Amino acid sequence: MSTTFNMDPNYWDTLAINELFEPNFTYPNMNIIKCLSRYNAALLIVDTNEMWNKYLTTMVKLISNAGITEIHKLALIKVSIHCAHKKKKLTPSHYIHLIYNSKGSMTLDFLDWAIEAYPNDTRILEVNINFKLTNKDELIAYELFKENAYKVSSTLWLIVIKYFLNKPQIWHIFNMAFGDESVCCNEVKKKLAKEYLLWLSKNKSLNDARNAYLLLNTNTVVMQKNPTRVQNVINHALLLHGNISDSLYVYAVKIEIEFLKNIQKAREIYTSGLEVHKYSSNLYFEAFKCELTNSKMLIQEVFNSGKELVSNDPALDVSVAKVIFESAVQNIKEDTDLFFQMYNAATQYNFSLDLSKEIKK
């Protein structure tokens, strides 16, 4: 019977906890000493994860309930936990509970032990960054975050964004999340999007926020899986904000021709856009480029079908692109950069070389 009890973690846990409530009038910390002694004996006999978990659970409670002036009591507990640390019996969860429930210098010690025991654990890393932010050690926290941004959770991203929101580092942080060389997965981006759009609207412009919204809602994965959703997002944005900025039309044309391969819809969009933004160089160039891209795709379709390309094939017709160029000449006479861009684009394809010569005149 004794052997059965001795191997039961619940038995030892109950014995140890009961020691804390025994009356003691001679030595203030005798209850803690006896409790720790019971656990030490238990862990020699029942060296299991369950027994260690029960021991750590009690230690965490004792630390969290202890007053900061109970120095001797805390020292006794700290020595006991350090022995467990040296024996490598603590899990990352154990360290995290100890860090968040301790006070003062003890917290720093637990954090150091955690990093020593689990230098590559993401949870410990996140606790370390968060702790340094809380203790105003922001430069070290920021460097740690930059080095490990690719693997930390969206929760930590939000903590870091909130802390640096009104500091110079915030632009770089958002760039790491949403820039061309983003280190974020799409799931993390979704959770950061609200903060990003709010920041853009307050610190950049509403136009930047709208464009970012479109980019976030029309990524390649979504376009491949649900092109109808993409079109709905674009159409809604144009309806609400198209008259404010030509960049929405530029982006919408690019989406229709490059991703959805819908030349008719692309033409509708750039035609409507040029009615509203008659002097937009960006939109004229996107429309011009759209027509060249369409011809390129039509030629590829002819080749893929195994047919030969004849001189009067509709795929070689660049008359619409020519009309766009001529309209641009009438409406935007002084923008030499636009015509240089059109010229460069036309020289990229054999079928538009004659057009490039006309632009060059």
Image (cartoon, rainbow, N blue to C red):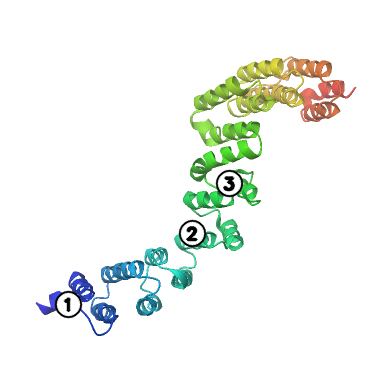
Q: Which residue is mark 2?
A: 126
Residue 107, label in figure: none
Of residues 284 and 279, which is closer to you in this image? Answer: 279
Q: Which residue is mark 3?
A: 177
Q: Earlier in the sequence, mark 1 or mark 3?
A: 1
Within-10-Å neighbours for mark 1: few <14, some 14–19, many 20+: some
The CA distance from mark 2 to mark 3 is 17 Å
Residue 212 percent coordinates (x, y): 60, 35
Residue 334, visible in the rendered structure? yes
Residue 54 percent coordinates (x, y): 27, 68
Of residues 214 and 301, which is closer to you in this image? Answer: 214
Q: Secondary structure at mark 1?
A: helix
Is label 1 in contact with label 2 (beta carbons under 8 Å)? no
Q: Residue furthest right?
A: 361
Q: Which residue type carries mark 2? A: Glu
Q: Which quadrant of the rendered structure holds the N terminus?
A: bottom left
